[in-house]
């Protein structure tokens, strides 16, 4: 998967897909929305409401052309995210925990559906073990590496109110924030 930059797939879309992407992005909280800085609470009930949330998040992630989306990004402060654990799979994980991280790390550029138009280098463990439950309450365990380990670490951070710009170098953070500063247009 070399066409992926962090949380966002980089590919050309036809006009209809591009329209769907814009609608999806309009439903995803954008930096500096306060929800993005808040820690999510553990999920206790594996009910239809949770499954409905997961379905909605999977659809938004796909339409937005992302490979991961955390509940905090849609303003729901619950510990759940959807992601691609492999090239052709989409899954939800509830109350996720990273129980093992490789000592080896990689630095790569990351993007975020909530911080559009910005890529920043982030150092992450190269491989992780992720455990939690699926939306039906069944225990799940993933051994992830490469971009799949990266996206799971990025999404787990979201549930703690931590963003990629909090994890990058001071220089890249400064540059990203200057791009994100609202521009005042005088006409
Ligand atoms: Zn993100």
Image: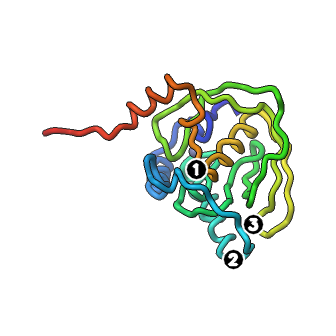
Q: Distance between the residues labelled 2 and 3?
A: 9 Å
Which quadrant of the figure shows ligand 1?
top right
Mark 1: few/some/many CA within 10 Å (<14, 14-19, 20+):
some
Report if residue 19 is visible in the image. Answer: no
Q: How far apart are marks 2 and 1 (CA)?
A: 26 Å
Q: Does the residue labelled 3 lie within 8 Å of ligand 1?
A: no
| Residue name at image x 45 percent, y 49 percent | 30
Position of the C terminus, as image quadrant, is: top left
Work out whether mark 3 precedes mark 1 in sequence or the reverse, and give the earlier one. 3
What residue is pinned by disc 3?
135
Which of the two residues, 101 or 55, is positioned nearer the viewer here? 101
Asked which secondary structure carries label 1, the reply is: loop
What's the mark number on residue 48?
2
Q: Nearer the viewer, mark 2 or mark 1?
A: 1
Q: Does the residue labelled 2 lie within 8 Å of ligand 1?
A: no
What residue is pinned by disc 1?
161
Residue 17: x %, y % from top left: 50, 49
| Residue name at image x 58 percent, y 30 percent | 168
Which of the two residues, 53 or 97, is positioned nearer the viewer here? 97
When asked about the image quadrant of residue 40, the answer is bottom right
Residue 141: x %, y % from top left: 86, 52
Residue 139: x %, y % from top left: 86, 61
The answer to whether 8 is drawn above or below residue 20 in the figure is: above
| Residue name at image x 81 percent, y 35 percent | 127
Position of the N terminus, as image quadrant, is: top right
Mark 2: few/some/many CA within 10 Å (<14, 14-19, 20+):
few
């Amino acid at each position: 998967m070399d066409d992926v930059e962090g949380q966002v797939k980089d590919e050309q879309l036809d006009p209809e897909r591009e329209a769907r992407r814009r609608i999806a992005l309009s439903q995803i909280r954008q930096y500096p929305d306060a929800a993005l800085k808040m820690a999510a609470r553990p999920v206790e009930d594996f009910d239809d409401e949770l499954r409905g949330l997961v379905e909605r998040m999977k659809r938004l992630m796909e339409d937005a052309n992302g490979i991961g989306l955390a509940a905090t990004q849609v303003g729901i402060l619950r510990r759940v995210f959807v992601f691609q654990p492999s090239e052709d799979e989409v899954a939800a994980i509830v109350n996720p925990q990273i129980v093992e991280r490789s000592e080896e790390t990689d630095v790569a550029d990351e993007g975020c559906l909530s911080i559009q138009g910005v890529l920043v280098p982030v150092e992450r463990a190269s491989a992780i073990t992720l455990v939690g439950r699926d939306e039906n309450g069944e225990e799940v365990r993933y051994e992830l590496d490469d971009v799949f380990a990266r996206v799971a670490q990025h999404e787990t951070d979201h549930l703690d109110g931590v963003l990629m710009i909090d994890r990058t170098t001071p220089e890249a953070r400064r540059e990203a924030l200057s791009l994100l500063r609202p521009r005042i247009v005088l006409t």
